Amino acid sequence: MIAVIGLVIGILAGLFLQLTVPTALQPYLPIAVVAALDAVFGAMRAHLDGIFDDRVFVISFFSNVLIAALIVYLGDQLGVGGQLSTGVVVVLGIRIFSNVAAIRRHVFRA
Amino acid sequence: MTPPPGRSGGVRRQLVIGALLALLGFAGATQIRSTHRTDSFEHQPRDNLVQLLDSLSAAADRVQVQITQLQHTRDDLSGTAKRRQTALAVARKRLEELRLLAGTVPAQGPGVTITITDSRGGVTAASILDGIEELRDAGAEAIEINNHVRVVASTSFTAPTGVLMVDGMQVRPPYVIDAIGSSHTLSEAVAFPGGLRDQVSALGGTVSVKEADEVHIDSLHRVQPPEYAQPTGG
């Protein structure tokens, strides 16, 4: 419950504060958001499987974000930032799909 | 996401998870907002962007040309204003000079006061006019007779009934002529051989000349607007 409230508060804060993303952060923030989404869906699946551990969630959340940012940074330095960003998004997207599929099986038994 | 029962600090863990999700929501919302804000250019095809850039630089060029033109206009106008001011100052000065010549303003300055006595009534209008002409030749800038008639270019000297009439006004002896100019030159003009003094002496009068640093001429000439003469351009 607290988790949902936190999410809503975060979204509202983001919408109403209207911060501009600093230029240095601009390539990383979208990837970081997708990576964090992956961690959240993984946590939901683990919760439904009955194996949720908040320590694992916290660590996976930060490691996902950091690694995604690192890959993009590396790609930028190598001159393939755009392609590598796409690759990261594709991989994370596939993971999100599989997690959501598992969640669906739990919720709808299908 | 309730923590498994039996674990301590469940609320604290939930708070940590809530904080992480808040962070995610915040970052996501901010990113979405900024994406929408920069959408207009970021996802345009290259050709469009090039066209946009071209039209922008063309517009900048046009505006630059306008700026140059307007600066020229401004410089012209300020130059014109300066010329107008100079012309106005020159015209004012000329007006003052012409007013003095036309006798429509009082005048003062160094000059002479000439007193002509005529006990026998022999002094004629012609000799007075001669004297005035001599004063003019000597550079008199303003002349007045008997403190009430200003002598200007159109002033007439007549004596139809034996009484001197200057511009139609009676002037009786002794004649007092005030003239503004170089006082030494003016007194010389009266005294030279065959000049006013000699003429008046021959006619039985006397002439006395007094040089002064400050001669006041207060009488004015009334200018009649010209009836026939029209100025021609030039």
Image (spheres, coloured by chain):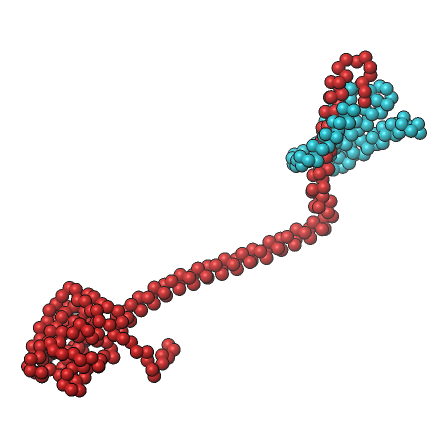
Chain colours: A cyan, B red
Q: Quadrant of the C terminus of chain B?
A: bottom left
Q: Residue at x 60, y 54 (%)?
A: B60
Horizontally, is B172 left or right of A34 in the view? Answer: left
What x and y, as percent, mark residue B200?
9, 80
Q: Residue furthest right?
A: A110
What x and y, as percent, mark residue A42?
82, 25
Horizontally, is B108 left or right of A20 in the view? Answer: left
Q: Is residue A67 visible?
A: no
Total labels drawn: 0
Q: Residue at x 18, y 84 (%)?
A: B158
Q: Is residue B42 above or below residue A19?
A: below
- Residue A52: name its quadrant: top right
Q: Residue at x 56, y 55 (%)?
A: B64
Q: Residue at x 23, y 76 (%)?
A: B152
Q: Is residue B12 above or below residue B125?
A: above
- Residue B94: name its quadrant: bottom left
Q: Quadrant of the N terminus of chain B?
A: top right
Q: Is residue B168 visible?
A: yes
Q: Is residue B97 above or below residue B5?
A: below
What x and y, as percent, mark residue A40?
79, 27
Q: Is residue B85 above or below residue A86?
A: below
Horizontally, is B49 left or right of B75 in the view? Answer: right
Horizontally, is B134 left or right of A2 in the view? Answer: left
